[in-house]
Image: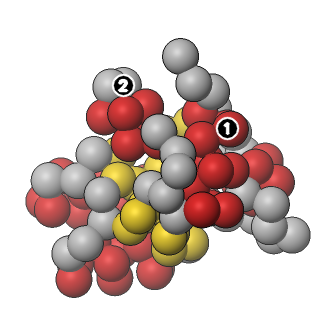
């Protein structure tokens, strides 16, 4: 089975994603994301809000075992990332991993 970290790196490199909780909520409200990935260090209020909007939009979500700094490193970004929405998976198999949790 594919590693979630490798697939996240692949989706950021070859697909299309939206980074950050405010942008992800906005994207969920407008429709369009195929999945949402959150870090486990995301604060409780933000996590509950994002999971609620995912449920309303019928979008699969997954909380990974990484801090926001680690998620930023996985995505090859020089800043922390609390969550991301996947709009296009590119060459990755990330949707299989998110939906199968």
**Dot label at residue 37:** none
The residue lying at 56 percent from left, 72 percent from top is 19
Asked which secondary structure carries label 1, the reply is helix
Identify the residue position indicated by label 2 in the image.
101
Pinpoint residue 16: horizontal percent, then vertical percent.
50, 70
| Residue 56 in view here | yes
Of labels 2 and 1, earlier in sequence is: 1
Give the foreground label among 2 and 1: 1
Is residue 59 rendered to the left or right of residue 75? left
Mark 2: few/some/many CA within 10 Å (<14, 14-19, 20+) = few
Residue bearing the label numbered 1: 5
Please give the name of the residue rendered at 44% of the width and 56% of the height, measured from the top-left corner.
89
Secondary structure, mark 2, is loop
**Disc 1 residue crowd, few under 14, some 14–19, many 20+, Cα 10 Å:** some
The answer to whether 79 appears left or right of 54 in the picture is: right
| Res. 100 image quadrant | top left
């Amino acid at each position: 089975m594919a590693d979630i970290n490798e697939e996240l790196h692949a989706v950021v490199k070859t697909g299309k994603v939206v980074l950050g909780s405010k942008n992800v909520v906005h994207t969920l409200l407008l429709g369009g994301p195929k999945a949402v990935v959150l870090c486990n260090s995301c604060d409780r209020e933000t996590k509950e809000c994002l999971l609620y909007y995912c449920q309303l939009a019928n979008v699969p979500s997954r909380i990974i075992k990484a801090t926001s700094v680690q998620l930023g490193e996985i995505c090859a970004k020089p800043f922390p990332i609390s969550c991301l929405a996947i709009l296009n998976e590119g060459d990755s198999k990330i949707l299989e991993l998110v939906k199968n949790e």
